[in-house]
């Protein structure tokens, strides 16, 4: 019996999300874009109408305006996107508990065990997959106003490929019977995990389609790409057997981080402290959500001339409080900053992570009241989750809100962490 794997891709998610909030934007060329004055002035997402004019993600605002004079720019609202993405994932969980996120707007679903419950009248796995996919597509549209393209297949890679083939609001089936006709004619770059560098290597030897990759000489692929060449060939042949992973089954988190480029270069101590504390509070809340402690703090610094370097230091004991993260990050900055050179951006990263279960208690609670600080910060997390990330801010941050006016990210479901096996 074949598995029934779906891959759902929310169509034009960020631009469409803005249209669900403001119906007057529907049908207009819009772009979700950063703030030029805050030095984030690029297109982050665009509507289909803007895309028809040639507007691309990564365009500067003046480039987008040149291509489409009537384009409307809207600022990103991550709380809105997280809220909508969570609603959509809740719909997926009505059909299966085997849901694996692939970014905020994409998910894999293994609905093999759901066939008899949601597709009783189906005569095959393919038919069951189509029935469930279409029902999910209709529910997402009616309950959120978003549209989703769904790929249906017997493995994850082909399901992902299917969701990219027809947009918007469509379902594509790639079965064992038709995958050679549907998949093998596509350019090799369409296969997941084939990046630009790999594509160039393959095309130099005439391997420019997925079909040619599937039938290529295995020794040549090994010579070109090592073990990865054989893995890609197996994928092209439809032999991917990777499971859909529940969130608790995902690879172990290796780091949690947050960084920002500020609207102006940071020159004074007060400015640097405000941004650093904001970043440390964000990382701290995310560590608590992941039930993790960290032993090492890394600080990334990019100066006004784009010279970038990173330094790290160990905490005296595993922690995740914003106060401890800030103290270490600030000490690293004071130790390694090059004179008074203005700073363009900062990043705080927590590494050397461990589970918070069974962490060792301090022998001197009166001098290290970690439990009380942890309880206080957890309470603040709850208030921000309920009333918004700006409901409570430290005084050190409030003196210039523009420097630290971002989102603490505590109500995002996405994993802000990096796992070794996820690096590509």
Image: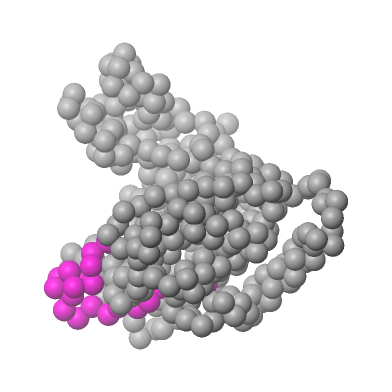
Image quadrant containing the C terminus:
top left
| Residue at x 80%, y 66% (from the top left corner) | 372
Left or right side of 174 for 123: right
Q: Is residue 144 visible?
A: no
Image quadrant containing the N terminus:
top right
Front-most of residues 226 and 275: 275
Left or right side of 134 for 30: left
Q: Point out residue 235 in the picture as x, y percentages from the top left corner.
A: 41, 30
Q: Point out residue 13 in the picture as x, y percentages from the top left corner.
A: 41, 65
Whether 51 is drawn above or below 126: the answer is below
Q: Which residues are magenta?
A: 58-80
| Residue at x 36%, y 21% (from the top left corner) | 226
View extreme (front): residue: 339
Q: Point out residue 44 in the picture as x, y percentages from the top left corner.
A: 33, 65
View extreme (top): residue: 219
Front-most of residues 93 and 18: 18
Whether 353 is drawn above or below 83: the answer is above
Instruction: Examine the image and state in which quarter residue 239 appears.
Output: top left
Left or right side of 112 for 402: left
Front-most of residues 365 and 286: 365
Instruction: Examine the image and state in which quarter residue 195 appears.
Output: top left
View extreme (left): residue: 66
Whether 241 is drawn above or below 292: the answer is above
Q: How many marks?
A: 0
Q: Is residue 268 visible?
A: yes
| Residue at x 35%, y 70% (from the top left corner) | 265
View extreme (bottom): residue: 24
Residue 274 in magenta? no
Q: Point out residue 112 in the picture as x, y percentages from the top left corner.
A: 60, 42
| Residue at x 34%, y 60% (from the top left corner) | 303
Residue 74 in magenta? yes
């Amino acid at each position: 019996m074949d598995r029934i794997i779906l891959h759902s891709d929310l169509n034009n998610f960020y631009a469409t999300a803005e249209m669900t909030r403001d119906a007057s934007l529907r049908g207009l060329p819009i772009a979700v874009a950063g703030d030029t004055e805050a030095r984030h002035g690029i297109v982050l997402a665009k509507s289909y109408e803007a895309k028809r004019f040639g507007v691309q993600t990564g365009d500067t605002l003046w480039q987008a305006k040149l291509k489409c004079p009537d384009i409307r720019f809207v600022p990103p609202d991550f709380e809105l996107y997280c809220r909508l993405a969570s609603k959509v994932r809740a719909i997926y969980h009505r059909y299966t508990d085997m849901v694996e996120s692939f970014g905020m707007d994409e998910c894999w679903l293994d609905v093999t065990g759901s066939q008899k419950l949601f597709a009783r009248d189906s005569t095959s796995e393919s038919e069951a997959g189509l029935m469930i996919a279409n029902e999910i597509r209709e529910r997402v549209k009616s309950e959120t106003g978003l549209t989703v393209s769904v790929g249906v297949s017997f493995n994850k890679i082909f399901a992902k490929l299917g969701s990219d083939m027809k947009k918007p609001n469509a379902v594509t089936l790639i079965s064992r019977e038709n995958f050679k006709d549907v998949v093998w004619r596509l350019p090799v770059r369409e296969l997941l995990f084939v990046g630009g560098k790999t594509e160039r290597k393959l095309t130099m030897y005439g391997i420019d389609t997925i079909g040619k990759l599937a039938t290529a000489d295995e020794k040549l692929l090994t010579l070109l790409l090592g073990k990865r060449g054989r893995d890609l060939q197996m994928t092209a042949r439809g032999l991917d057997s990777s499971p859909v992973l529940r969130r608790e089954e995902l690879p172990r988190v290796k780091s949690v981080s947050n960084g920002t480029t500020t609207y102006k270069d940071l020159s004074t101590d007060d400015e640097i402290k405000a941004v650093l504390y904001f970043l440390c509070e964000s990382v701290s809340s995310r560590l608590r959500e992941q039930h993790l402690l960290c032993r090492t703090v890394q600080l990334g610094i990019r100066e006004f001339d784009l010279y970038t370097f990173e330094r790290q230091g160990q905490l005296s004991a595993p922690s995740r409080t914003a106060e401890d993260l800030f103290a270490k990050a600030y000490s690293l900055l004071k130790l390694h900053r090059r004179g008074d050179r203005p700073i363009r951006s900062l990043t705080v990263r927590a590494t050397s992570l461990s589970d918070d279960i069974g962490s060792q208690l301090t022998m001197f609670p009166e001098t290290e009241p970690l439990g009380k600080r942890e309880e206080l910060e957890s309470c603040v997390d709850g208030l921000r989750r309920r009333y918004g990330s700006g409901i409570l801010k430290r005084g050190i941050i409030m003196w210039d809100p523009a420097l630290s006016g971002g989102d603490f990210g505590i109500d995002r479901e996405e994993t802000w962490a990096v796992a070794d096996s996820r690096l590509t």
